[in-house]
Amino acid sequence: MKKNKTKMIILITGVIVLVLLVVSNFIYVSPRETLLYKAQQYLTYSKSDWENYEENKKILANNPTDGNRVTEVERAVSPEDIYSLDTNRVAPEVKAEELKKIKKAHFENLVPASQTLDHEDAQSALIRLTEGRLTDVIIHQKINIKVGTCYNNPNKEGNYHCVSCMILLYNRDTKDWQEAPNGDHFLKPEYDFYQPSKGDIWEAKDLSMRIPFDYDLYKKFQTKK
């Protein structure tokens, strides 16, 4: 009896492996995807998921991230506390310190940018800045980059135009924003985005100017309850 059960398990396993081998010949899997992930897509993706997937494929195709591309990654000259905090979600003592920093920053002197970038521009720029690390997050974690209000940044560093903006990670599955990528928190909440020359594509670099926390951005992309 036990012998027959063992044979049955081996037979079922063999059939599953054979089916996977046959299916793999008919399903295209990109170098960044696995056959298991592809099968999961066909089983679980809705029409909107496929539309987002195809749109992201276009973005990634237009913004190659191979090892031969030279990516300009400049470090911010300011300390880590240049990044603004959500004062509604921190401890009272942290909030008090943050309010002091806001007062010293004189946000009233900031000029909202009239010439700025859209969500896809910001996402593409960050794909290049992170040398493709963001690509896996976009595909496997169903996350897209959303960009908030941008402010003119006088620190152009020889570029044609520069703005500073907050970004948000929008989960296409939950229809809500999330704090950071699962497993690898390599993204920062704010970045400088710049155009090397007039009409050029937008690139990204580390933040060099403190800007306000963009509450409207988070409100816009949170799940409506």
Image (cartoon, helix red, strand yellow):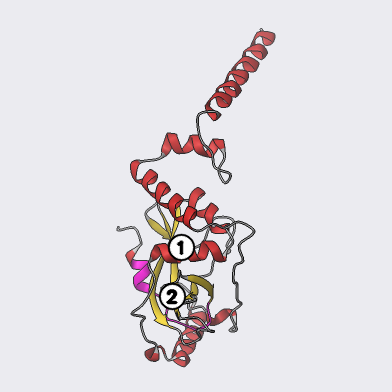
Residue 137 higher or lower than 85, as above or below: above
Residue 112 quadrant: bottom left
Residue for point 54% across, 28% down: 25
Magenta-highlighted residues: 207-219
Q: Position of residue 193 (x, y in %)?
A: 47, 74
Residue for point 50% across, 70% down: 203
Residue 59 relative to residue 157: left or right: left
Question: Label 2 amino acid?
Answer: Cys
User: Could you give the CA–CA distance between mark 1 and mark 2, rounded to whole angstroms?
Assistant: 12 Å
Question: Label 1 amino acid?
Answer: Gln
Residue named by callout 2: 165
Q: How many neighbours does mark 1 have within 10 angstroms: few (below 14), some (14-19), or many (20 or more)?
A: many
Residue named by callout 1: 123
Q: Is residue 155 visible?
A: yes
Which of pointers 1 and 2 lies earlier in the amino acid sequence? 1
State whether the magenta stretch is mostly helix, strand or loop.
loop
Q: How many neighbours does mark 2 have within 10 angstroms: few (below 14), some (14-19), or many (20 or more)?
A: many
Q: Quadrant of the C terminus?
A: bottom left
Residue 110 quadrant: bottom left
Q: Is residue 173 visible?
A: no
Q: Position of residue 118 (x, y in %)?
A: 37, 67
Residue for point 50% across, 32% down: 27
Labelled pair 1, 2 in contact (Cβ < 8 Å): no
Q: Quadrant of the N terminus?
A: top right
Residue for point 51% across, 48% down: 140
Secondary structure of residue under mark 2: strand
Q: Position of residue 139 (x, y in %)?
A: 49, 49
Instruction: Mark 1 vs mark 2: give the one in front.
Output: 1
**How many numbered marks, from 0 up?**
2
Residue 176 relative to residue 90: left or right: left
Residue 48 higher or lower than 79, as above or below: above
> Furthest residue to the right?
3
